[in-house]
Image (spheres, grey):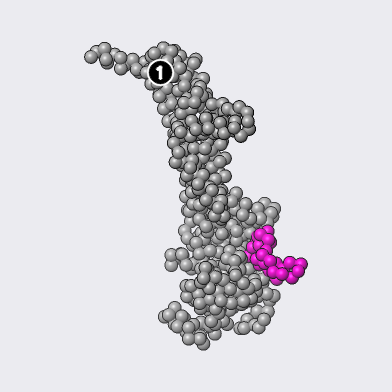
Amino acid sequence: MLENLQQSLEAFDLALFWEYRAVLLPGLLYNFYVFFLTVGVAVGLGLVAATLRLSSNVVLRWIGTGYAELCRNTPEYITLIWIFYVPPLLLSAALDRNVSFSPLLAAVIALGLASSGYFTETFRAGISSVPRGHIEAARALGMSRSLTMWRIVLPQAVRHMLPEAMNQMVSLFKSTTLVSLIAVPDLLYQVSLVSNATSKGLPLYSGAALVYFLIIFGFATLAQRFSDPWRQRSR
Amino acid sequence: MSEVGVTSTGRVVVKVVDLHKYFGSLEVLKGVSLEVHQGDVLTLLGASGSGKTTLLRCINHLEQPNSGEIWVDARPMGFRIDAAGRRRRAREADVNALRMDIGMVFQQFNLWPHMTVLENIVEAPLRVRRWPRRDVHERAMALLEKVGLVDKKDQYPSRLSGGQQQRVAIARALAMQPKVMLFDEPTSSLDPELIGEVLGVMRALAEEGTTMIVVTHEIGFAREVSDRVIFLHNGLIEAQGTPEEVILNPTSERSRQFFSKILH
């Protein structure tokens, strides 16, 4: 009984995590690395797809919608593995030479695709939340389409979509822990390496959980602080 | 064009010729023609669905008519005649350029909520007209003075009452120094106690000789301020003339019915 308890307590022995910090913490850099690259890809693709979804052309609208739904409704886990293995195979066959994706590249493409689906929806909703009358007022004053978009629509749309986009970035950061699956050496991957080598995995996972929690909680709090006052102004 | 009951002799600022407009299969304008001279106040009256708002929105091309012509300040709105004499759709830049000379005030005010009162007013003069900043700000302040809202210049629209918002919207339109002002039911979404302040500003504009086309349900205002009134029914001009002729002594049965309901 007492032994059991002691064993469970050992699972929280963060000293072990600290002992291996030189191996573990550089892994964290990879989480940030993947995160920032993926945000770039996801926001870029999301903007393109949102523009398609808002187009007056039915075919373009349909393509945008199809893309967003495909991205949103496929589990990231599967997208990740699929992107890592399948496109290189297809490219190899097509180009008749050996093509492979580095784990980092595959991770950024896969997570970028997956979350771009959500960003598409957020951007579209943000842009269409701007009342038609505000646009008409601008056009009636002689403002061009692009000036109206830039000065009237986007500033309001960004305020509307900010909290939602922040949430999506937080979950994107969580998703970066998936990349250990295809051997991107992030924190979780390092944890599993050390844990295999030392057979004392549990405290390491506890440590990783705590580190991830602190980062994500900090990020979410900052996001809220940052977006609240900015939103207020538009009321 | 004949001058039906027109008191002024100024040049024509807005000319509409045989305008037709469909929404799907519904014909909302069935061939409307009119002229507005410089300094005139024209009021469009009629039941809802008579086409008066659509007519107004066609003049600055927020709605595109299916056929007919609109001329603003002797320039074609929304169409051009190509070298072969054929009628073509206007270039967007030409439509935008002509819109600078047409002020519009909406029922829902449509101020931009992310900009202060002053920013709302100077936006188009600075970025569309590209007038010098100092002149634009000076004139904006003069306009705020005129509509009685100088102390609100740094407020966001959400902090203003409906009447104040509409007065800012009028100042915003005037800041472009338009040749004609269009008012689309400017008091219809205001609480009754706020209607007077907006009509007061409009009355002052009319007295200064601003060319105005007003869609309204305020019959008292129409009688007092208009040089000419047009009564629309089912997309056609049913009656037109001076306020006395159209409102007080209606000759057509439909306008008699309409005005007797409103006046009593």
Q: Which residues are magenta?
A: B74-102
Depth check: give the residue in front, B185 or A163: A163
User: The disc labelled 1 sits on which kind of residue?
Assistant: Leu
Q: Is residue B77 magenta?
A: yes
Image coordinates for residue A111, horizontal then vertical, percent:
50, 34
Position of the C terminus of chain B, as image quadrant, is bottom left
* Disc 1: which residue: A204
The residue lying furthest to the right in this view is: B83
Depth check: give the residue in front, B101 or B205: B101
Residue A139 visible: yes
Relative horizontal placement of residue B116, taking residue A12 as reference (left or right)? right
Q: Secondary structure at mark 1?
A: helix
> On what subunit does the disc labeled 1 rest?
A
The residue lying furthest to the left in this view is: A1
Image coordinates for residue A18, horizontal then vertical, percent:
43, 15
Residue name at image x 31 percent, y 16 percent:
A9
- Vertical arrangement, residue B69 with respect to residue B130, above or below: below
- Vertical arrangement, residue B12 with respect to residue B138, above or below: below
Number of numbered labels in the structure image: 1
Position of the N terminus of chain B, as image quadrant, is bottom right
Depth check: give the residue in front, B136 or A97: A97
Image coordinates for residue B197, horizontal then vertical, percent:
50, 66
Circle 1 residues within 10 Å: few <14, some 14–19, many ≥20: many
Q: Is residue B153 magenta?
A: no
Asked where in the image residue B244 lies, by quadrant, the reply is: bottom right
Residue name at image x 46 percent, y 81 percent:
B259
Residue name at image x 37 percent, y 18 percent:
A202
Residue name at image x 47 percent, y 72 percent:
B48
Image coordinates for residue B80, horizontal then vertical, percent:
70, 67
